[in-house]
Image (cartoon, rainbow, N blue to C red):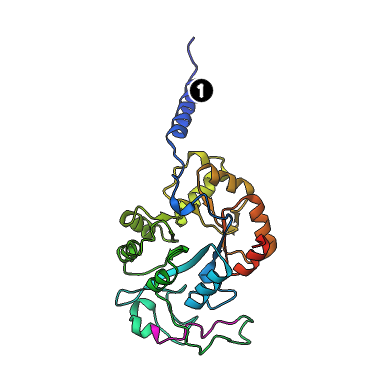
């Protein structure tokens, strides 16, 4: 029986689809997501910036004392090559100083009041101002909390942080306790090449591709080069967080960790959907939701 042209096309497409499905691979297991952890993970965004001055040793210590599972922080590099923790590229928003982090030395940055502009009540009070709280370094955090898991976001810098960052992770034996994130695909690609044993989350373009593929029911064809999806509830008018998205991610052995979720109602909803962790400025609220 001679096949018609359209039948040949259908058969060819079917073979391609089957082949792609067979060669696609889920993310491998990684020790960062150990089976004995207490899921969903409470991930303290900047150490809990809604409760204490974020990115400070005070915040990280308080978060640890609260019992959180993961400390989240943002990585920059000083002009003299020291890795420091701050959300912004400049010190203007959170300290009593001015200038870009990358143009300042560690000594200059350590002179700043890192809690100067933190306020729990929209600027009515500044309870931690003038208490000697300094900008923290990554090495200080590794030294103080060697048993903690950490999500560390590589921020936008002119100088590459991949090698000094990887070197510090290895020096403190944190390869199985650190998850590296970044919105910048090239910076994350660079880090993966330098430090392949360390888990990473998806970068911006990777996240976009996976989200769009799941919307088209093609998530099963995706072979991730990462271990988790740290995503907003919605982006650019597209709802990212849905039960179907969580299911599709889990089918590719990917953790789902939405950000930045600060209200109990949304936390409960996402927990019911089976998320693996929640990134929050209010770890105190999430601990209450979980009854811990």
Provide residue 180's location: percent of width, then percent of height.
42, 60
Q: Is residue 275 magenta?
A: no
**Residue that sits furthest to the bottom in the current view:** 130
Placement of 134 over or under 165, stated as above or below = below
- Number of residues whose C-alpha sits closer than 10 Å to that of mark 1, classed few (under 14), some (14–19) or many (20 or more): few
Provide residue 201's location: percent of width, then percent of height.
46, 55
Provide residue 159's location: percent of width, then percent of height.
31, 69
Residue hosting label 1: 6
For the residue pair 234 and 178, the one nearer the viewer reads as 178
Q: Is residue 112 magenta?
A: yes
**Residue that sits furthest to the top in the current view:** 1
For the residue pair 147 and 193, the one nearer the viewer reads as 147
Name the main secondary structure of what is drawn in magenta.
loop
Please tell me whether mark 1 sits on a helix, a strand or a loop. Answer: helix
Query: Which image quarter holds the C terminus?
Result: bottom right
* Magenta segment: 110-119
The residue drawn where x is 56% and y is 44% is 248
Provide residue 29's location: percent of width, then percent of height.
45, 46
């Amino acid at each position: 029986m001679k096949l018609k042209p359209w039948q040949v096309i259908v058969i060819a497409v079917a073979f391609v689809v089957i082949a792609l499905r067979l060669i696609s691979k889920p993310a491998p297991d990684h020790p960062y997501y150990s089976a004995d952890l207490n899921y969903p993970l409470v991930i303290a965004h900047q150490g809990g910036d809604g409760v204490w001055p974020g990115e400070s040793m005070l915040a990280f210590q308080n978060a640890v004392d609260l019992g959180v599972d993961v400390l989240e922080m943002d990585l920059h590099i000083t002009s003299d090559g020291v890795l420091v923790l701050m959300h912004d590229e400049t010190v203007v928003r959170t300290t009593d100083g001015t200038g870009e982090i990358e143009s300042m030395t560690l000594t200059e940055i350590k002179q700043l009041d890192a809690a100067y502009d933190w306020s729990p009540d929209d600027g009515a009070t500044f309870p931690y101002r003038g208490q000697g709280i300094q900008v923290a370094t990554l090495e200080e955090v590794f030294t103080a909390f060697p048993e903690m898991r950490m999500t560390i976001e590589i921020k936008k810098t002119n100088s590459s942080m991949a090698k000094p960052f990887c070197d510090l992770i290895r020096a403190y034996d944190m390869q199985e306790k650190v998850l590296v994130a970044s919105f910048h695909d090239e910076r994350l690609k660079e880090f993966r090449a330098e430090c392949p044993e360390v888990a990473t989350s998806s970068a911006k373009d990777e996240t976009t591709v996976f989200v769009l593929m799941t919307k088209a029911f093609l998530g099963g064809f995706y072979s991730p080069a990462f271990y988790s999806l740290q995503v907003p509830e919605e982006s650019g008018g597209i709802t990212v967080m849905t039960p179907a998205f969580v299911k599709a991610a889990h089918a590719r052995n990917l953790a789902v960790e939405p950000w930045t979720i600060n209200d109990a109602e949304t936390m409960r909803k996402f927990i019911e959907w089976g998320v693996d962790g929640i990134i929050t400025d209010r770890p105190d609220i999430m601990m209450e939701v979980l009854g811990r």
